[in-house]
Image: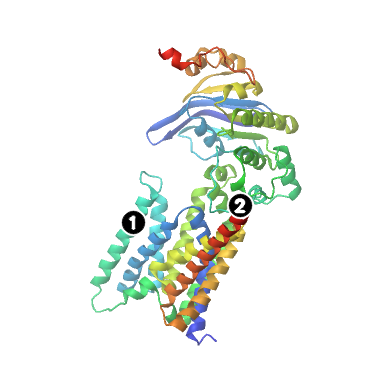
Amino acid sequence: MNLVDVEGLSVRYGARTVLSHVSLGVAKGEIVTIVGPNGSGKTSLLRAIIGAVKPAQGKVSRGADVKIGYVPQKLHIDETLPMTVTRFLNLPHSVAPQDIEAALTQAGVPNLSKSQLSQLSGGQFQRVLLARALIGNPDLLLLDEATQGLDQRGSASFYQQIEAVRQETGCAVLMISHELHVVMSASDRVICLNGHVCCEGTPAVVASAPEYRALFGTGTGGALALYQHDHDHNHDHAEAAE
Amino acid sequence: MLDDFMVRAALAGIGVAIAAAPLGCFVVWRRMAYFGDATAHAAILGVALSLAFSMSVFIGAMVVALIMALTVNLLSGRGYAMDTLLGVLAHSALAFGLVAVSFLSGIRIDLMSYLFGDILAVSRGDLSVIWCGALLVVLLIGWRWSALLTSTLNEDLAYASEINPKREQLVLTVSLAITVAVAIKVVGVLLIAALLIIPAAAARPLSRTPEGMAVAAGAIGMLSTVVGLRAAYVFDTPAGPSIVCIAAITFLISSSLKSALSMRS
């Protein structure tokens, strides 16, 4: 029994179809990464899973008692809204103080509980969002480009944190990322999305699939290494222009 | 005690301030400042209709404000930007209201008293309407507080916690309609939005949590009412605008306090 099953899901906004006939499932404890170009329906897929958009066709089913922790894309907090980290983690339901501390520690930011949200750095903020998602020990974490705006080191350490959380709690992870070379080594399975599921499988299988290469080119050939960069391309554009 | 018109005025103002405080915070956080204006302008149409059909002004204003709130809720996110939509609805409702008033032959109504309010003329009956409305709004907002706050932060975060942000927005707009309807008599249509926004804005620099801000806004609203009424009595100025002036001065003080503090550190 999967934690979440998506069967034949289509999502439309007005006349525009963003997803058609998408099927996928996430099993207990696995890390699944969704990759795809801009506008490929990645965010819509996650929004359909949390119930924020109604499917035009197909269905999304959650296992009984499956708890979902959701980390949205960068969250904008209005300047006029005063909010401490502790208060934020108590939304919408209040939580025992020791659970707050535990979640913050798990997310790698143990000393922030009294800070104002508006004063956190980008990396701290994403970790506080992660801490909020971890409260109540979810069975499945959903992450929507959780490292947007972080530099490469910041996002690498964020994804290492995710893997550590998975090892510690055994929760499954379904995440969207465009930083293929950073996340793919940590994923059990990769789904390549472009309005429909183009291809899926282990990172190695997807990285060499022709559909994937057609979408992302061969420039991401180093996709399997955590810190590997491509050094085979030319930085000296002035020379190339001559 | 209630025989004194100044006491009745103060109690009326305090009632409105209590309802406006938590509501005003949400209006500020969600950047709906114009929404208060729009609902209030629409209420003039309600006043005209209620005089035409000899109903209570409160009921008329309430019904039109509710219809307005529901229409905005329904139309939002369908191709028009929110401020355009509110602008169209607010000003056309106000215009239709003013035209409708001109058809009321035989009845002389003092439109000025609805535009600027007449807090000194508040009766015992008005007082009970205001306090019932205020109590209802506070209970409604208090009941939905956490869900409202979560959907204000982020709609998807709300959905993920099994909260429907559309429903919460409806709670907010209905509360706004109630507040506008009960506050018309006190501060009038033109100043209702001020009573919603200024105390909340003045409370912002003094608060660390959303709850703290709502309580501070309530305190500032009540203080402005009492001081404003006293000032109106002493200087013989119009009561509603005097209350808003005091609130504005509080805002000035609290924001300069904040910049002074941030300069020191």
Query: Looking at the image, how many numbered discs can be counted on the residues?
Result: 2
x then y, percent, for residue A72: 57, 38
Mark 1 surroundings within 10 Å by alpha-carbon count, few (fewer than 14), some (14 through 19), many (20 or more): some
What chain does mark 2 sit on?
Answer: A
Please indicate whether residue A65 sits to the left or right of residue B190 in the image.
right
The residue lying at 36 percent from left, 63 percent from top is: B41
Give the vertical position of B213 relative to A90 (above or below).
Answer: below
Q: Nearer the viewer, mark 1 or mark 2?
A: 2
Q: Dot 2 corresponds to which residue?
A: A83
Q: Nearer the viewer, residue B43 or B209?
A: B209
For label 2, count other residues whose C-alpha is less than 10 Å away and answer few (under 14), some (14-19) or many (20+). many
- The subunit carrying tag 1 is B
Report, in whole angstroms, how far the alpha carbon at label 1 lies from the one at label 2.
Answer: 34 Å
* The quarter of the displayed image where residue A75 is located: top right
Residue under label 1, please give it: B89
Rendered residue at 57%/56% (across/down): B144
* In the image, residue A96 above or below residue A160: below
Residue A28: x %, y % from top left: 68, 29
Q: Amino acid at mark 2?
A: Met
Mark 1 element type = helix
Which type of secondary structure does the marked residue at label 2 adopt?
loop
Q: Nearer the viewer, residue A124 or A210?
A: A124
Q: Position of residue A1 (x, y in %)?
A: 66, 28
As shown in the figure, which amino acid type bears the numbered disc 1? Answer: Leu
